[in-house]
Image (cartoon, rainbow, N blue to C red):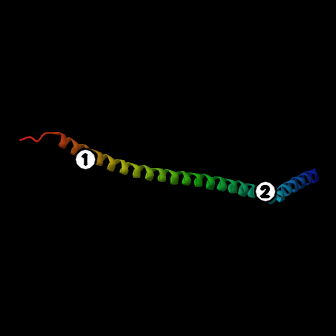
């Protein structure tokens, strides 16, 4: 009876040792998988950040161009107002 118990106990311990011996290989496989996934995420994020950065550069260029156009239009409008004011003063008879 004690021999059966001892045999069962030894068999159980051998199974546990076999499972434990396989753990380093499983951990290495998981580590490699995680490294691959992190590399993919890193590549994806880098591409997305580059796209956002390029979009911001384009937007800044458009804003700068719009600002220049607004300044030109502003100066044109001031010139037009001055010209209209001069023409209006010429058409009015002099008041005494």
Q: Circle 2 is placed at which residue position?
A: 29
Find the residue positioned furthest to the left. 96
Quarter occupied by residue 32: bottom right
Residue drawn at x 11%, y 42% as measured from the top left: 94
Is 51 in front, or is 40? Answer: 51
Question: Disc 1 to disc 2, how far (Cα)?
Answer: 79 Å
62 lies left or right of 43: left
7 lies left or right of 19: right
Is 60 in front, or is 8? Answer: 60
* Mark identifier at residue 45: none
Label whose residue precedes the other's in the sequence (1 or 2) = 2
Q: Circle 1 is placed at which residue position?
A: 82
**Image location of residue 5, percent across then percent down:** 90, 51
Q: Residues within 10 Å of mark 2 (few under 14, many from 20)?
A: few
Is 22 in front, or is 90? Answer: 90
In this view, the mark in front (1 or 2): 1
**Image location of residue 12, percent across then percent down:** 87, 52
Q: Residues within 10 Å of mark 1 (few under 14, many from 20)?
A: few
**Image location of residue 74, percent across then percent down:** 33, 48
**Image location of residue 39, percent across then percent down:** 69, 57
Q: What kind of element bears circle 1?
A: helix
Residue drawn at x 21%, y 45% as measured from the top left: 86
Q: What kind of element bears circle 2?
A: helix
Residue drawn at x 84%, y 55% as measured from the top left: 19
The quadrant the C terminus occupies is top left
Q: How many marks?
A: 2
Residue drawn at x 75%, y 55% as measured from the top left: 33
Position of residue 76 relative to residue 28, above or below, is above
């Amino acid at each position: 009876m004690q021999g059966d118990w001892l045999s069962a106990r030894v068999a159980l311990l051998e199974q546990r040792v076999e499972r434990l011996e396989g753990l380093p290989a499983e951990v290495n496989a998981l580590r490699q998988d995680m490294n691959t996934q992190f590399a993919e995420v890193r590549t994806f994020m880098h591409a997305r950040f580059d796209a956002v950065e390029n979009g911001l550069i384009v937007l800044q260029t458009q804003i700068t161009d719009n600002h220049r156009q607004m300044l030109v239009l502003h100066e044109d409008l001031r010139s037009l107002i001055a010209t209209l004011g001069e023409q209006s003063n010429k058409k009015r008879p002099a008041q005494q």
